[in-house]
Amino acid sequence: MAVTIIRKILAVAFGICLIFSAVPGKALGEPGYIIVGDDNGLEIHVPKKTQDTGNLNPGDKKYSSLKLVNTGSRPLHVYIRTNILSERAPRGGRLSEVMTLVIKDKDNVITDHSFKDAAREGNVYIGRMSPGAEKILDFYTDLPEEIGNDYQASSMRVNWTFTTQSDKDD
């Protein structure tokens, strides 16, 4: 009989370094992340130095990463979900429709869409992590160079939910 352990880790509002904000404008990030659910050993480590995204301009590209570590005694199946918490589009231009998000685990592309489409995907399987295993997730985004003034002062607030499952028999 399989026992499912679910842990949701919400990387709050660009707290994992992917703070995408106004064009130009102020960053809407809150540092850190929240762990919700049972303790099953998944840890998320945020880099010490984060990206400054307080004033993105057309053509800007940003990069960040997270380190996932299974400190538990059982293998974990790990999923990620992109959540758009809020979005402001005072001139009509929605950043979630034009900003791209690429999340990779080494050469494995987990998502490669606009933020809006990435959020629509729901939970996406990252992979299986044995006890003691580590994964580095790389996050890439860019604001297209060709966007116009419709995106000025636009902003969005995003976080990621990590869900894990562990089988009792593993």
Image: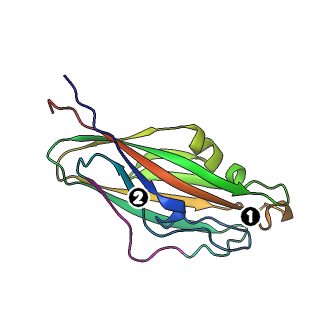
Which of marks 1 and 2 precedes in the sequence? 2
- Vertical side of 91 occupied by 56: above or below: below
Q: Secondary structure at mark 1?
A: loop
Q: Which residue type carries mark 2?
A: Ile
**Residue at image location 71% in from the left, 68% down from the top:** 22
- The local crowd at label 2, few if under 14, some if 14 to 19, many if 20 or more residues have their Cα within 10 Å, is few
Q: Position of residue 15 (x, y in %)?
A: 49, 66
- Occupied quadrant, residue 65: bottom left
134 to the left or right of 83: left
Callout in the foreground (2, 1): 2
Asked whether residue 140 is drawn in magenta, I would say: no
Asked whether residue 48 is drawn in magenta, I would say: yes
**Residue at image location 17% in from the left, 48% down from the top:** 131
**Residue at image location 15% in from the left, 33% down from the top:** 170
The majority secondary structure of the magenta stretch comes to: loop
Query: The N terminus appears in which quarter of the rendering?
Result: top left
Q: Farthest residue toward the top?
A: 1
For this rendering, which residue is in front, 140 or 81?
81
- Vertical side of 75 occupied by 86: above or below: below
Region in magenta: 42-51
Q: Which residue is mark 1?
A: 145
For this rendering, which residue is in front, 53 or 163?
163
Q: Which residue is mark 2?
A: 34
Q: Position of residue 144 (x, y in %)?
A: 71, 60
- The local crowd at label 1, few if under 14, some if 14 to 19, many if 20 or more residues have their Cα within 10 Å, is few
- Occupied quadrant, residue 60: bottom right
58 to the left or right of 36: right
Scheme of image coloration: rainbow
